[in-house]
Each structure stands twice: as structure tokens, then as C-alpha cells.
Amino acid sequence: MSTNVNTEPRHRRTSSGDNKPEGQMNERFVYKDDDAIEKPFNWKQLTRLISYMRPYAKQILPLIALMMIIGTATKLAVPFLTSMAIDKAIDPDPSVGTPSLTMLYQITIIVLVLYIIQWITGIFRIKYTNIIGQRVIYDLRADLFRHIQRLSFNFFDKRPAGSVLVRVTNDVNSLQDLFTNGVVNLIIDCVQLFGIVIILLLINWKLGLAVIVTVPIMFFISTKLRIRIRRAWQEVRTKNSRINSHLNESIQGIRVTQAYTQEEENMKFFDHMNKDSKKSWDKASAMNQGFGPLIEITGGFGSLILFWLGATLIQQGQLTIGLLVAFAQYVGNFWEPINRLGQMYNQLLVAMASSERIFEFIDEDPNIKSKPNATKLPQIKGDIKLENVVFEYEKGRQALKGINLDVKAGQSIALVGHTGSGKSTIINLLSRFYDISDGKLTIDGYDIRDVEVESLRHQIGIVLQDTFIFSGTIRDNIRFGRLDATNEEIEEVAKAVGAHEFIVQMPNGYDTEVEERGNMLSMGQRQLLSFARALLADPRILILDEATASIDTETELKIQEALKLLLKGRTSFIVAHRLSTIRHADHIVVLDHGRIIEEGNHQALMKEKGTYYGLIEAQYRFL
């Protein structure tokens, strides 16, 4: 049963002898979900991101706010104290007083204390913002993964695994700086800017306005660049997603690559994608770095205004030297948050590009889900009826064309036919991995579209040809069928399917750690574990999809007796190309291009000498 069929066209890889331009090679991994998301800056989406901080607002944010206010206040007080030191302690007006070392020492000690307070508040602020940031990232990644687990098969049919992987890892990770530093720094910088503007205007409103006038110029230029920067970072995410997709496929298909000695060609293709990604990053990074020099140039222009006009005001007696020095310090402190806000804006653009991709998945509505008023399916007997069932994977391409089938509880049904005849489609519909396009499918009289999906699948067990073995112990893999099973129950089902013998010979028996996908086990051993898993789950309906195709003859004979136990009292559907395994089925259904063309038991179908008879004869001729 295929659960990861990519419906997008893939272009074959060019060989060294082809004349196809190298630049066209990246077409191989162009997927719809990787297209740049062309949307205006969405403040609602930013609010949605910030809402993930809400659960921690009462716990930590008040403390962070207090540290922020104290730190900002101490920073804004230092230039004012500097002006006092110059105008009152170092070079006072003769009509007011004389230089005073005592006052200078006092001011110096006060400034030193303020710096210490600022340092301490900074330590606590960074500590607690990191705590909030990591908790928010944890919640966001958990929400994303939880939602992905609920998405329907057709979602994964159209997306490579690497593209999904990059959302949960890279895109979520790219938001860490925003939550750990960005949001709090944004508030601090805004408060600091507001305070500096007020102080500048209070010191001398003419000089303050002259310096601040450069801000709209900088803002206008940066606004013009934002769309280009945003698209550049979207392109970076897209290229990284394609690299992940190719990397995942390359690892999964490493045996085929080595078998056909295509390592060098595969490396060339990866190198091309890697260079393409680097070019995109360089382009986006160059735009990103452009903000710094832009603000420095604007700041330099503001400094020229400051000292020219400031010197004029001193000569006119409207400004003291101390206040001009303080003014210069405040202006320096003014451009610092402006610079950070420019960097923050770039960081925000990167975060928005990632958040768009994350929320695109989170907002994806599962095609298969329980209705609001869905009935919980009670313990079933296993009567199944398909009434004129039609199904289309894509509009206009019917995989099933009016299937009618009446299966009684406890019967074993074998589905036979050529590849593409509709066998796997029927079992996909039974488990409601897809919804039928037309007709009706009932279990014990319940339309499966009207019952809770979980209560349906809980009573169905599936054994696939390519069974999946998770990283962990053998015991854990069997227990996956029923998580509350005892060790004794696990060993009992393993003995029943003939797996106990090879398990006890493993280094640590049932506690032996298997590698990813069970690579340390043979195909037959993996299949036996899947049988044990299914038996432990004790389903009312059992589906065997080419379950014995990868098992050698000796192992197949070993599990034939186990299958009798596994099938006893259960409604079962068996898909098999090895027709010798289904001759004892109660009912055999022969499919061709989505239609039932023959049905009956083995003896009846052999007497008809139709399609089934021809398939049996063909297999015996090749034995």
C-alpha cells in the first residue's frame, strides 16, 4: 500500500552525456508546496506568533518588564549625569561656581553603580527571555507535529518527506531568535527611542528636530527594500527545503544508488542544489547586511547636523558644552536602537517567511476527520458492505468504478488483480485513509463516514509488505500494537507467529535495540514482528497487504499456521500476488481497472477458466 506517492512530475536526472543545460537540473525537485508564498506582510500572523507567549505572560513577563524598565532608565540617566559632570564639576560657569573634584567623584560613583545595575538587570532579562523563548519554540513545534500527525494521506501523497521535515526543524528553529531576543529587544528599543526623543526635545527642541529629521529618510529607503528582502529569504527557505527533500530521498534510496554506481552523478546533482542554495543565501544575506551601512550613513548625516548646529547654539549661548556632549551621547544611543530595529526588521522578515510555511501546515485542514456529531463505533462483528463505491485519487481519474461487495463477519476475502486494478485502494477506503467519492461503505451497518475515525481504526489491523520497524527494542515494536500489553502477552503473540525463536537468539532477546527501520533484521523477521504486532492489537478486521511477498518459502510455511490463528474469528482482507497464499480464502475477488470482473472461491473460479484461472496458470508456468 503506497502512502507516499508524489503526484508532481519529476524530470529525469541528466547524465554526463546529455546536452541539457545544467541550470535545468533543479526542475527535478520543484514541488507546489515549495513555491514562494506571495502575501503582504501579515500583522495578524505576527500577532498569532506572539500569542504563543501568552501562557507565560503572568509568570515571567512582569519580571522581564521590571528588569527592562530599570535597565532602560539607568541607561538614559548616564548622559544626563555626564553633562552635570562637565557643566558643574569640570567646567562650570564662573558666575555659578568653581570646579569640584568631590562632585566629579560622586557623579562617577553614581554612574558606576548605574552601570552595575544595568549589567545585573541585563543578566536576569536575558535569562528569563531565553526561558520564555525556548518554551514558546517547544509549544510551536509540538503543535506543528501534533497537527501533522492528524493530516490525511493525500497531504503526504503530494509532498516529499524532506519538505515536511524542514518545517518542523529549520523553520521552527529560525524563530528562536525572534522569541528569545527579538520581541523583548523590540520593546526595549521602542521605549528607549521614545525616552531619548523626549529628552532631546527637552534639552533643545531645535537641535532635537534637526537630528530626528533623518529618521523618515531612513525609514522610506528601508521600506522600499523590504519586499525584496522578504522574497530573498523565502527563496532561501525554498532551496533548503529542496535540499532536505533530495537528501531524504538519497538516504532512503542509497542501496539503489550504489547498486547502479550512480554515486558520482548523485553527488553532482546535490552539489548543484547546494551551490544554488548558497547563492540564494548570499543574495539574501547581502540585502540583510545592507541595513547596517544604510543606518550608519544616515547616522553620520545626523552627526554632521548635530555638531554644526550645536556649535552655533553654543556660540549663541543657547546650549552648554556639557549638554552638547550629553546630546551627542543621546544621539549615539538613539542610532543604536534604530540600527537594532533595522536588524530586527530583517529578522522579522526571515521569521515571517518561516512562520508562513509553518502556519500553512497548521492551517491545512485534514480531509479525513470525524464529524462534529460522529458516533463512536462500538465493538464490531465485522460485517462489511460496499455499495456502488466510486473513488478518485484525482478529479476525472477513477480508481474504483462502482464496486459492490457484501462481506460477512469472520470471512476472509482475497483481492486479486494486476497492478493498478484497485486492490490497495479498497483497503485504503476500509481504514478510511481516504473518503469514497460516491456510493456507501458500511461496517455492521454504520457508514464509516459517520463514526469517529479513531474508534474505526482502533478495530482494524494492517500488515503491509514493507512493514515499518521503529527505532527501539523488539519488545517496544511489538507493543506498538497495544501499549498496555504485558511482557507475557508480548512473548505469547511472538510465539504464536513463530517470531520467538529468532528473538531469543538476538544479543539481548526482546530488549535488543533494532536500528532505524529495522535494518539489522531480515525482511522475514521484520514481517514476523509485524504479524505479532497485529495479533497483539486483536483487531476485528485484519488487512494483509502483500504481507507474505517478502518472506522466503520456509518462513512462509512457518507463518501459515500462525495465520490460521490470526484470521480466526476475524473479517480479513488479503491482497497477494503470490496466489498460492489465498487459495483457502472464503471469497476471492478479481479486479481489473477498478471493476470486479470475477468473484467466488478458488474451486469455482478455476472451473470458470477466466482471468483468475489465467493468473494461476501463469504463476505455475514461471515456477
Image (cartoon, helix red, strand yellow):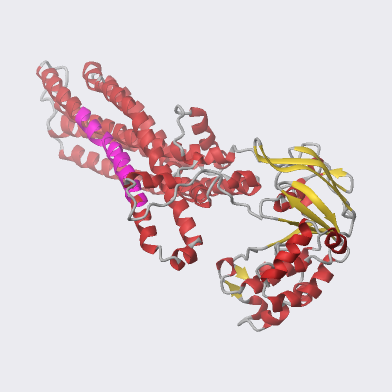
Q: Position of residue 342 (x, y in %)?
A: 32, 33
Q: Residue at x 19, y 34 (%)?
A: 85
Q: Is residue 399 left or right of residue 411?
A: left
Q: Main secondary structure of the magenta part?
A: helix
Q: From the image, which quarter does the C terminus lie in?
A: bottom right
Residue 538, horizontal then vertical, whole percent: 81, 63
Q: Quadrant of the N terminus?
A: bottom right
Q: Is residue 171 above or below residue 190?
A: below
- Expressed as whole percent of the image width and height from the top left, the position of residue 502 reads 67, 81
The magenta stretch is 273-299
Does residue 429 lie above or below 561 as drawn?
above
Residue 523 visible (yes or no) = yes
Task: Quadrant for residue 458, please give it.
Answer: bottom right
- Is residue 189 placed above or below 237 in the rendered structure? above
Q: Which of the two residues, 349 or 465, is positioned nearer the viewer here?
A: 465
Q: Nearer the viewer, residue 31 or 319?
A: 31
- Asked if residue 381 lies in the magenta stretch, the reply is no
Q: Measured along the vertical axis of the image, is residue 164 above or below residue 103? A: below
Give the image location of residue 179, x and y in percent.
46, 42
Residue at the spot 76% in from the left edge and 46% down from the top edge: 595
Magenta-colored stretch includes residue 284:
yes
The residue depicted at 77 percent of the width and 68 percent of the height is 581
Q: Nearer the viewer, residue 255 or 79?
A: 255
* Quadrant of res 374: top right
**Quarter of the view holding residue 299:** top left
| 443 relative to 181 in the view: left or right | right
For the residue pair 101 and 593, the one nearer the viewer reads as 593
